[in-house]
Image (cartoon, coloured by chain):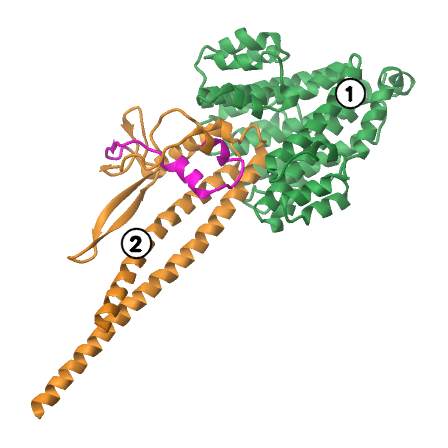
Amino acid sequence: MMEDQEEKGNAENGIGRQKQVKDEYLLQFLDSLDGYLTLLDSLSSTLSQGWLELASARHAMGASRINGALLDLKVHAAATSLKVSEQDVDSMESQPCFTLCKWASSDNGERSSGEEKSLSPQLRHRNNSQLSGIISSPVSFSHFFNFFLSCEEEKVSTRTGTPLILVDQQRQKSLSVFGVLVSPKLRSAQLSFERALETLVEIANLHTTMLSMFEQVHKELENTNG
Amino acid sequence: MYGFEAMTFNIHGGYLEAIVRGYRAGLLTAADYNNLCQCETLDDIKMHLSATEYGPYLQNEPSPLHTTTIVEKCTLKLVDEYKHMLCQATEPLSTFLEYITYGHMIDNVVLIVTGTLHERDVQELLEKCHPLGMFDSIATLAVAQNMRELYRLVLVDTPLAPYFSECITSEDLDDMNIEIMRNTLYKAYLEDFYKFCQKLGGATAEIMSDLLAFEADRRAVNITINSIGTELTRDDRRKLYSNFGLLYPYGHEELAVCEDIDQVRGVMEKYPPYQSIFSKLSYGESQMLDKAFYEEEVKRLCLAFEQQFHYGVFFAYMRLREQEIRNLMWISECVAQNQKSRVHDSVVFIF
């Protein structure tokens, strides 16, 4: 009888622990879902701000100075790139992890900043129709994403200078397609889109975490039902 | 002699002054702007504009409309009116009217040269050019590799030729050189226009001197603010300022060394006409500066219509229409982006 009671107690403890683990996974899933929705909202408002600032810059500088026809079609390294790596969640599975490498472009063989890493090949291709539509209206974020992320497979060498100065130089270089003396409104628009890009990468990472948590919760539910 | 224009002006300029005053009466009113600011879609804007003088230019545009389409069609109306005035004008009014378009010509030249540097198709660039700044050989600009070739192959036969003497070099065209070329050309154009108006004398000289001096001063402020934090040196910045205006020469010396917006404010507040502009801005802020300058410009342009028998009304009308088109562009963008709360950030009411 004592043994039966002990076994019953152990079983109850086991069920309790399982329930605790299930609750933890569920909480983590709900947390990541909440973060995901918050970031989506933040992305939407940052993009709205960016597009309005771009329209404001166009209003100040004139349509002939800010339009899609001025965007550079010459082949050159992307100023910003995205690294996709595999991150081990536990011994059984791994999930993709996205890292944004901002303003780490190369020019004439010289590297401006950044760690040594290899970029994934051909994330996106630019083409005329996408570029000509970029400035004229906020058609879709993927078009502007293309503009920042089109790249070729290459390696970036170690840094050569103070990051902040180089980042400012890269920002100015990126804006120089519209001229050297541009309105502060255009620079604000650039910063807004930069923030939006960072938010987008955070969303991608959170999305993979959320899916991973969802699978864990699903597994636990199946184990319980089984 | 100033004061006797009433006796002779109407012989050659009377008809066109009446025409331009008629055109001025067609500018959008406060009621029009109230209606436009309440539009929910671009089709609503088109519907409201159909009751104005822009109606015939927009009526055949299919939905869905685009903000650039609205701006293009409204600009076509301005171009038609300008061409009507130009073909009726005699000297020296015809030369005066041509001077008004040289700024757009400079913008078009820079657009073609910059776009070619970025390996864009010439036809695509030509479609983006301002119609008031077109000239016959503009497409040939794409073949030039440096400023000397630009001048020799194309610009020597255009009205911009005299402005090139200060910026002819054999250096290859890059973003910085193009920017310096743009501003040097514009500086030379403004100075030439100013001298031309001074030669005309009378009320034209007095009114246009004020308007062009304001333009030169505003350019100096914009160049200063836009060059903060860039590679443009103080000397290069100083060379881009025009050699006339209220700020010339002492204000220019101070602006050349400014490193932030507050230093610019400190310089400008010493000049009473610009104190009121900068008093509208809070410290460290430059976002509303453009609107403040536009409002001051509109005030001065409207005052030009208070006097008769001078050419300033033509310049004032063209600038007021351009301001109106900027207003329509901003309202359209706010409506298209669902940001109607921001519509009053940049709309400048005329009259």
Residue A84's quadrant in the figure?
A: top left
Q: Could you say which disc has been placed on residue B102 in the image? A: none
The amino acid on which the numbered mark 1 sits, given as a three-letter code, is Met
Q: Which residue is rendered at x = 48% and y = 46% of the image?
A: A47
Front residue of A38/B210: it is: A38
Q: Could you say which disc has been placed on residue B85 in the image? A: 1
| Chain of the residue where label 2 is placed in the rendered structure | A
Examine the rendered structure and indicate whether residue B44 appears above or below residue A13.
above
State the SS at label 1. helix
For the record, the magenta segment spans A131-160
Whether residue A154 appears in magenta in the rendering, the answer is yes
Q: Is residue B262 left or right of residue A173?
A: right
Q: Which residue is mark 2?
A: A208
Quadrant into which the N terminus of chain A falls = bottom left
Q: Which residue is rendered at x = 35% and y = 48% of the image?
A: A201
Give the colour chain B carries in the figure.
green
Examine the rendered structure and indicate whether residue A147 appears above or below residue A208.
above
